[in-house]
């Protein structure tokens, strides 16, 4: 299985705390015999067998954005700048989603799902908490809902407390279910997951 993972956070080296859990996820997925992994993320040390999907220009742009605190931070503090960053993200990451050969997109943070628009690649989308602010932007819930309907998808909040918050804030999540212990989704660390089929069956339990 060819997996393209996207993240706007990744540690530069062993002493960097930023995106450390993403690095651990990349290491775990990279060790699987049934997964060929590519990573679109800020520059950093990649495990053996994991390919960089970001161009040098993308890597430089992601590195600068990471130094500015990331999109979630900008949404809280500098909304106008955040809007520009989101547009640039859609263009840059959208190019990667369209040019990289992938059976599944492993998307970390909701904002990284936006560039999936117009593709049909199945997606695992992790919701990590800091990306909640995205849902407050005008039209964002409608856009995310449309993007999900274009593909089979799994939404994977990484903490149980997010489930009612997501359901309350957005009509994207029509119902919520607990995924079984030891989910077979490659790299998933969620405690609650939703699966979406775009062919009329709607949301279903992963159990």
Image: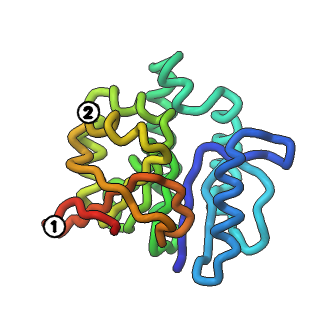
* Residue 59 showing in the rendered view: no
Estimate how packed mark 1 is, as few (under 14), some (14 to 19) or many (20 or more) residues with alpha carbons within 10 Å.
Answer: few
Q: Name the residue tied to disc 2.
A: 168
Q: Earlier in the sequence, mark 2 or mark 1?
A: 2
Q: Name the residue tied to disc 1.
A: 201
Residue 141, given in percent of the width and then of the height, sits at 27, 38
Residue 198, given in percent of the width and then of the height, sits at 21, 65
Residue at 70%, 43% in the rendered image = 60
Q: CA distance from mark 2 to mark 1?
A: 22 Å
Q: Residue 13, relative to residue 82: is it above or below?
A: below
Residue 93 versus residue 143: which sits nearer the camera? 143
Q: Quadrant of the C terminus?
A: bottom left
Element assignment for label 1? loop
Residue that extends furthest to the front in the rendered view of this protein = 181
Residue that extends furthest to the right in the rendered view of this protein = 15
Q: Residue 119, relative to residue 134: is it above or below?
A: below
């Amino acid at each position: 299985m060819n997996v393209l993972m996207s993240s706007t956070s990744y540690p530069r080296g062993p002493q960097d705390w930023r995106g450390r859990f993403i690095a651990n996820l990349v290491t775990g997925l990279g060790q699987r015999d049934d997964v060929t992994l590519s990573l679109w993320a800020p520059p950093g040390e990649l495990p053996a067998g994991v390919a960089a999907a970001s161009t040098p220009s993308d890597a430089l742009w992601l590195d600068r954005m990471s130094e500015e605190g990331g999109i979630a931070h900008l949404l809280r503090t500098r909304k106008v700048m955040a809007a520009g960053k989101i547009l640039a993200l859609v263009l840059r990451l959208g190019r990667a989603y369209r040019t990289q050969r992938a059976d599944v997109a492993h998307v970390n943070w909701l904002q990284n799902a936006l560039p999936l628009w117009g593709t049909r690649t199945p997606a695992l989308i992790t919701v990590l908490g800091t990306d909640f602010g995205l849902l407050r932007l005008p039209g964002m819930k409608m856009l995310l809902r449309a993007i999900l309907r274009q593909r089979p998808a799994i939404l994977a909040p990484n903490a149980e407390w997010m489930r009612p918050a997501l359901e309350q804030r957005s009509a994207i999540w029509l119902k919520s279910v607990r995924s079984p212990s030891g989910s077979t989704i490659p790299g998933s660390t969620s405690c609650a997951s939703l699966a979406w089929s775009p062919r009329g069956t709607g949301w279903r339990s992963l159990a």
